[in-house]
Amino acid sequence: MPAPLPVYMPWLMTAGFGWLYYRRIRRHFGWQPWRPRRTLVRIVLLAVVVALLGLAALYLPHVAPGMLAGAVAGTGLGVFALRHTRFGARDGQPGYTPNPWIGGALSLLLVARLAWRWYDGAFSQGMASGAGNASPLTMSLAAALVCYGLVQAIGLSLRMRRGDGEGG
């Protein structure tokens, strides 16, 4: 029989997830320095996640239409957001400023969906509920956020390599 988890473990996990969400949400606001290696890693990881979501759609046909709609919406939103991203340098460091309204809406959507799933008791069931019970709404939001992130990362990479971050 496995050892019981310490009483404080849920608090530590909550704090850890809070820190991760803070870091993720922070990237949507204010001037961001251009980090080519980090962006390349992000592109590779998000491309793998998109491929895995595609495989999940094959094995979970009840969520496939929602995932496709989410992917299309996320791609469109990524293109729209790129058009509303400002590029420029600060102290010789190239960077960009994403549109705070788009980032804020995406962050609010993500947190609201997680809060709803938590309120609904989805996380209290553990993994015993199985992947077959995946929510179409959750999977479509996941596809939208991942495709948005991938389009943003690729678009930023192309624009910054073109020299938009040097002051234009």
Image (spheres, rainbow, N blue to C red):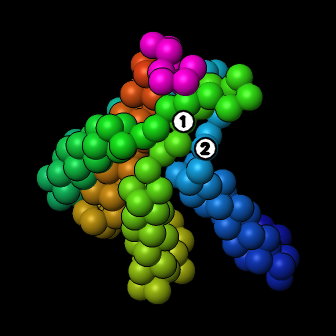
For marks 1 and 2 on the same chain, the one whose residue lies earlier in the sequence: 2
Is 166 inside the magenta-drawn segment?
yes
Q: Which residue lies under the disc numbered 2?
A: 31
Instruction: Say which of 35 and 140 sits in front.
Output: 35
Q: Quadrant of residue 20?
A: bottom right
| Residue 156: numbered disc | none
> Can I make out residue 10 in this image?
yes
Q: Quadrant of residue 10?
A: bottom right
Q: Residue visible at 23% across and 43% down?
A: 76
The residue at the far left in this view is 65
Q: Residues within 10 Å of mark 2 (few under 14, many from 20)?
A: some
Q: Which residue lies under the disc numbered 1?
A: 96
Which secondary structure dominates the residues rendered in magenta?
helix
**Residue 101, image x and y in percent?**
41, 60
115 on left or right of 61? right
Q: Residue visible at 48% across and 45% down?
A: 98
Q: Residues within 10 Å of mark 1 (few under 14, many from 20)?
A: many
| Disc 1 + disc 2, Cβ < 8 Å | yes
The residue range painted magenta reads 160-168
Which element type, helix, strand or loop, lies under badge 2? Answer: loop
**Residue 39, image x and y in percent?**
56, 28
Q: Residue visible at 39% across and 50% down?
A: 145
Quadrant that contains the N terminus? bottom right
Which element type, helix, strand or loop, lies under badge 1? Answer: strand
**Residue 131, image x and y in percent?**
37, 59
Residue 38 sits above or below residue 74 on the image:
above
Which amino acid type is marked by label 2? Trp
68 on left or right of 17? left
